[in-house]
Amino acid sequence: MQTFTAMRSFVAQYPKTIALVTVTGAGLFGVQKWMAGGVCRSKASLEGKTVLITGGNTGIGKETAVDLAKRGARVILACRDMDRANKAAEEVKKRSGNDNVIVKKLDLASLQSVRQLAKDVLASEGRLDVLINNAGVMSCPKWQTEDGFEMQFGVNHLGHFLLTNCLLDLLKKSASSRIVTVSSLAHQRGSVFVCFYFTSRDVDWYSLSGMPSFSVSFDIKYHICECCFHSTGQIYFDDIHQEKDYCPWKSYAQSKLANVLFTRELAKKLQGTGVTTYSLHPGIIRTELGRHFWPTMPLWKRVVYTPLMFLIKSPTEGAQTTIYCAVEESLQNESGLYYSDCAPKTAAPQGLDDEAAKKLWDLSASMVGLI
């Protein structure tokens, strides 16, 4: 009784403070739920089906693996780091209750490794119902793959391009089957919002991030990465490896746009085969994908950004659109489209360019030795 009386007294003494804390807390909770996005509601079973996920040992790839294993699928985790992959496989088995989870070696920065995995899968698997091109690298330094390609374009696009083509016959044999490629909102422009620091003028965040619009003001000086801010996502056909003017975010945007265009052109080539294709934006997620740029940020920026981690998606939330594209029954006759928050979305205009998609396909096929 005394505790209740003390609480009433405190509320009466500080009504505005309590109201502010309550409203702020409710607002933050609401924003977090909004940022979490859509949830895959499909109850589809994958009993008797086989799924291959690249990069399935961490982040949204691992969460996707858990969900699909729970549905009864045989899950293949195709990963570069076998130690981490084996640990992830054990976790997936434990969480899903499905022991039919295996690991295979794949280094997307090596065309030889990609071909070896494809050869292994074709020899050991009687079917492949879902291929999920999930693995990727983001905003890394100016690195090259084993074959001399710019790292982000090589891993995010060319490695998956070759892997998909090498497995097409098995996918066709297993039809109806699906190819799901994880792209990003970054395909729209060179910088989503990480290259934005702080500004002393009002900023329309829609123009920077593509998210619902609101404006903020700061009294701190700003710096904007010029190579990113002034560029829309595009395929630099005259400098595909960004040798003239490398910018990590511009390169990342090119690779994610390549994912969208690849999915679009692939859908055309697979018409009538029973194999359908999907690209998607998973959302802004708390994963290790940002491991290359986070350490380069000044300490004060990391201090500012850290509390915002509460508002962005968890790996489980971020995996929902991938899962949706892999299992949602209503998508069976859809192909070549782009999705976000478990719903179809219109890609950026450059992601709808059929001429660029065809040109990219021909260039990619030549680069990986398919023609």
Image (cartoon, helix red, strand yellow):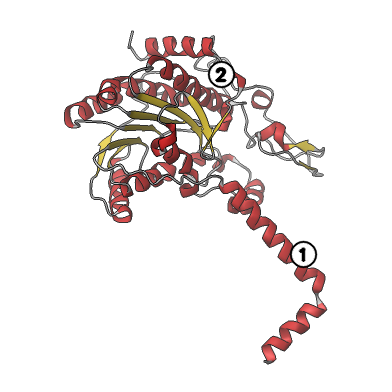
> In the rendered image, which residue does mark 2 sit on?
352
Task: Give the residue type at disc 1.
Answer: Leu
Q: Which of 49 and 57 is in front in this view?
A: 49
Residue occupying the point 36% across, 29% down: 178
Q: Is residue 79 visible?
A: no
* Residue 17: percent from left, percent from top: 78, 69
111 relative to 23, above or below = above
- Asked if residue 127 lies left or right of residue 244, the reply is left
The percent coordinates of residue 176 (x first, y second) are 32, 28
Residue at image point 64% right, 22% down = 232
Q: Depth check: give the residue in front, 138 or 213.
A: 213
Q: Is residue 208 visible?
A: yes
Q: Where is residue 244 in the image (x, y as percent from the top left)?
A: 57, 14
Image vertical order of residue 107 relative to residue 268, above or below: below
- Mark 2 to mark 1: distance in Å? 46 Å
Image: 205 above or below 22: above
Q: Quadrant of the N terminus?
A: bottom right
The location of residue 248, given as percent across then percent down, is 56, 28
Q: What element carries label 2?
A: helix
Neighbour tally class for label 2: few under 14, some 14-19, many 20 plus, Cα within 10 Å: some
Q: Which of marks 2 and 1 is nearer the N terminus?
A: 1
Check disc 1 and report the residue beneath it: 20
